[in-house]
Image (cartoon, rainbow, N blue to C red):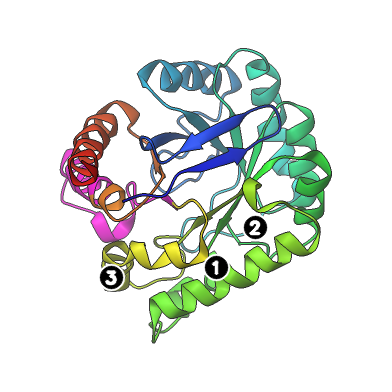
């Protein structure tokens, strides 16, 4: 049975656990691994965000810097050049909260000023620990994602010896950093970080053992969508593989799933949620 949580954001509270929430991905980067360049134009990004909400997304997660394997870091000013026009267009136009995928304190601060209610830190407060203070000062929600190494070095990393033990230890440390600057536990969500410095076969193990994260007593977000460990010969087949991974994530305790294809994954989530409900009754 999935534990219920109330996730406090900047302007609202989300109930997590009754049903799985869908976080729709909106990449506005020119070089993202799956849809790079498709929504880098602010008008197209705006239209896509509206579409994602109409398709059933509960949260929109906007990313302006790619963290695909081998990608290099960009400056805060470049990230803001991409992000600010989109956030300005979306302000007060969505009925659902906006999350911004960034590890930079400067970017997070501006994003929250422009209406974002959640910061999704891909580095789990390891790249810029001062990001936590920005989130604390602004009363935003914070997602702590587990990342091993950095995207530019992932190809050189050896396999993790004890994946779940390492992830639990590192996420516990990230939670401690967040709590240390005054972020209330009710504002935190954890993510095991599929593909973020993990070998292909280890992602399957993490997916199967997602329930281990319940030991941290925080809501769990899972983002297997289009990750390389699920890649099939065609885009359509990869979507089916993603749907399977999303359903397993829900059955293993995920409160939120981060997906690119909201419409298709909503069907997968609905089936998994129904199975969970039969277990509870």
Q: Which residue is mark 2?
A: 73
Asked whether, in this view, residue 145 is left or right of residue 108, the answer is left
Q: Say what secondary structure mark 1 lies in.
A: helix
* CA–CA distance in space, label 2 to label 3: 29 Å
Q: Give the mark nearest the N terminus, 2 or 1.
A: 2
Residue 128 visible somewhere in the drawing: no
Neighbours of disc 3 within 10 Å: few (<14), some (14-19), many (20+): few
- Labelled pair 2, 3 in contact (Cβ < 8 Å): no
173 to 128, vertically: above or below: below
Q: Position of residue 121 (x, y in %)?
A: 62, 53
The dot on residue 205 is 3
Q: Position of residue 126 (x, y in %)?
A: 67, 67
Q: Residue at x 67, y 25 (%)?
A: 87
- State which region is magenta: 221-247
Q: Position of residue 107 (x, y in %)?
A: 75, 43
Q: Residue at x 53, y 65 (%)?
A: 151
Q: Say what secondary structure mark 2 lies in.
A: loop
46 to 75, vertically: above or below: above
> In front: mark 1 or mark 3?
3
The dot on residue 152 is 1
Neighbours of disc 1 within 10 Å: few (<14), some (14-19), many (20+): some
Q: How many marks?
A: 3
- Labelled pair 2, 1 in contact (Cβ < 8 Å): yes
Q: Position of residue 147 (x, y in %)?
A: 53, 66
Asked whether, in this view, residue 110 is left or right of residue 237, the answer is right
Q: Residue at x 66, y 14 (%)?
A: 92
Q: Give the mark nearest the N terminus, 1 or 3.
A: 1
């Amino acid at each position: 049975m999935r534990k219920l949580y109330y996730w406090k954001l900047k302007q609202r509270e989300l109930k997590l656990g009754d049903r799985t929430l869908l976080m729709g991905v909106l990449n506005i980067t020119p070089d993202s691994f799956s849809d790079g360049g498709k929504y880098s134009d602010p008008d197209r990004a705006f239209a896509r965000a509206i579409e994602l909400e109409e398709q059933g997304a509960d949260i929109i997660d906007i990313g302006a810097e790619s963290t695909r394997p081998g990608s290099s870091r960009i400056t805060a000013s470049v990230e803001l050049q991409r992000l600010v026009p989109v956030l300005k267009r979306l302000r007060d136009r969505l009925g659902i909260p906006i999350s911004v995928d960034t590890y930079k304190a400067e970017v997070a601060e501006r994003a929250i000023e422009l209406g974002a209610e959640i910061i999704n830190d891909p580095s789990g407060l390891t790249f810029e620990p001062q990001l936590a203070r920005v989130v604390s000062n602004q009363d935003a929600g914070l997602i702590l994602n587990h990342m091993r190494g950095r995207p530019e070095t992932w190809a050189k990393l050896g396999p993790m010896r004890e994946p779940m033990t390492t992830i639990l230890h590192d996420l516990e440390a990230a939670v401690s950093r967040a709590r240390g600057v005054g972020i209330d536990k009710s504002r935190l969500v954890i993510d095991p970080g599929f593909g973020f410095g993990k070998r292909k076969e280890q992602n399957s193990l993490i997916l199967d053992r997602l329930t281990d994260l319940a030991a941290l007593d925080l809501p769990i977000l899972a983002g297997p969508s289009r990750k390389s460990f699920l890649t099939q010969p065609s885009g359509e087949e990869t979507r089916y593989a993603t749907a399977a991974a999303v359903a397993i994530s829900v059955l293993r305790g995920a409160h939120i799933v981060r997906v690119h294809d909201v419409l298709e994954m909503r069907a997968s989530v609905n089936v998994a949620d129904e199975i969970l409900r039969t277990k509870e009754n």
